[in-house]
Amino acid sequence: MFRAPAKASLIALVLLAGGCGGDEVARIASAPVPLATPTPSPTPTPTPTPPPVAEGFALKSDKPFVTYGLSEVDTLGSASSLSGSKDNEKFVATRPGSRDQRVDFSYNSATGEYSLALPDGLADKLIPIGQQSTNWSAHRVSDGTHAEAYVSLPKPGSEWSPYSYSHFGYWEQTGADAGLTRTYGVFAYGSETPASGVPVTGTGTYNASIFATSTADPFWVDGTAKLVFDFGKGTLSGWIHPVHQTNGWYPDYDYDYGQFDFVQTLYASGSARYSGKFAKDGTTLEGSFFEGSLTGPSASETVARFVAPFVRNGQPGSISGVWVGKK
């Protein structure tokens, strides 16, 4: 399960969590001078150096990734700050994620660079920034003028990203209105399983982790999901269980959203894609949806995005996020 940091201090947490460890430098003694000078050998042609792979990325592919993403836009009052303190997160308005939002994440094998295109139109290559933490890497994408976003991704092989064919990240953008408008977004991407690699017999159970935002909470929402496919019959069942937790920072803000069950699922035998809606306590939630893909050889992993509406203390809200999972 993901452990969620405060939404308003993402990059600070990335840069401060874990710090940088210094590698010990080995001191190698000089070899003795030979008695006879050997005949010089022809200088070999140097092997081309492959382009560097940016920190924090698990996947490289000449084929386009399948990408799912959503963003939430929060506007704060003029007396608020963005320090991450729950007392200062005074939202005036919040716009949750919606189905029409599109995120694209891509890799250029010729340059070894990754690019990100966000729902508001900002699109460019990712540039590593600052100090790398133990489990996360920080990056920036900019249009070369005033618009920019800060992007964080978990490092491959860490507890945050135990996947081989799928990955995820999040970004934040500050508006031009003295920082009172801020966009938080999440995305998941992967190497979609080709039709020839999707099982058409048997079943598959996937356990996934959630990473999301909530219009009711100043911190990230995490939790779990379970997906059960019958590949032969072409059916899908499952649920998500979002949890808002502050890791002991502010226990009064912790909240368990309970289980949201899959309903009205669409999945066809031999397909790598699926979709559906959510129900809570037997009632289908208006405006809910999820859509995702199977990833990796033999559909070994999965990525998806979702929106799950809720009512909390009599007030309507919405969770917008992604999940990443594997068999």
Image (cartoon, rainbow, N blue to C red):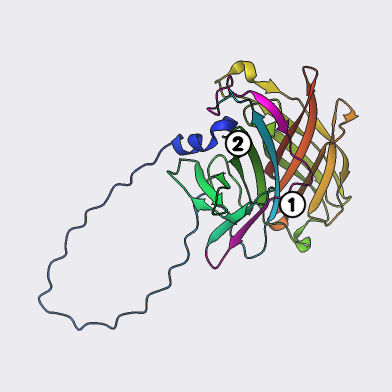
What residue is shown with label 2?
Answer: 177
- Mark 1: give few (<14), some (14-19) or many (20+) Cα within 10 Å: many
Relative depth, front residue between 302 and 62: 62
Alpha-carbon span between mark 1 and mark 2: 40 Å
Instruction: Name the secondary structure under disc 1.
Output: strand
Spot occupied by residue 221 in the image (x, y as percentages of width and height): 66, 31
Asked if the residue under mark 2 is in contact with the one under mark 1, i.e. CB atoms within 8 Å, the reply is no
Relative side of 20 to 186, left or right = left
For the C terminus, the quadrant is: top right
Q: Callout 2 environment at 10 Å: few (<14), some (14 to 19), or many (20+)?
A: few
**SS for tag 2?**
loop
Main secondary structure of the magenta stretch? loop
Q: Amino acid at mark 2?
A: Asp
Residue at 46%, 47% (x, y): give it: 129
Quadrant of the snapshot with the N terminus: top right
- Residue at point 60%, 60% (across, down): 107
Type of the residue with mark 1: Leu
Membership of 218 in magenta stretch: no
Would residue 103 be counted in the magenta stretch? yes
Numbered range of the magenta stretch: 82-111
Q: Earlier in the sequence, mark 1 or mark 2?
A: 2
Answer left or right for 267 relative to 161.
right
Residue 111, horizontal then vertical, whole percent: 52, 65
The residue positioned 46% from the left and 40% from the top of the image is: 134
Q: Nearer the viewer, residue 166 or 93?
A: 93
Residue 89 in sight: yes
Q: Is residue 198 above or below residue 205?
A: below
Residue linked to disc 1:
294
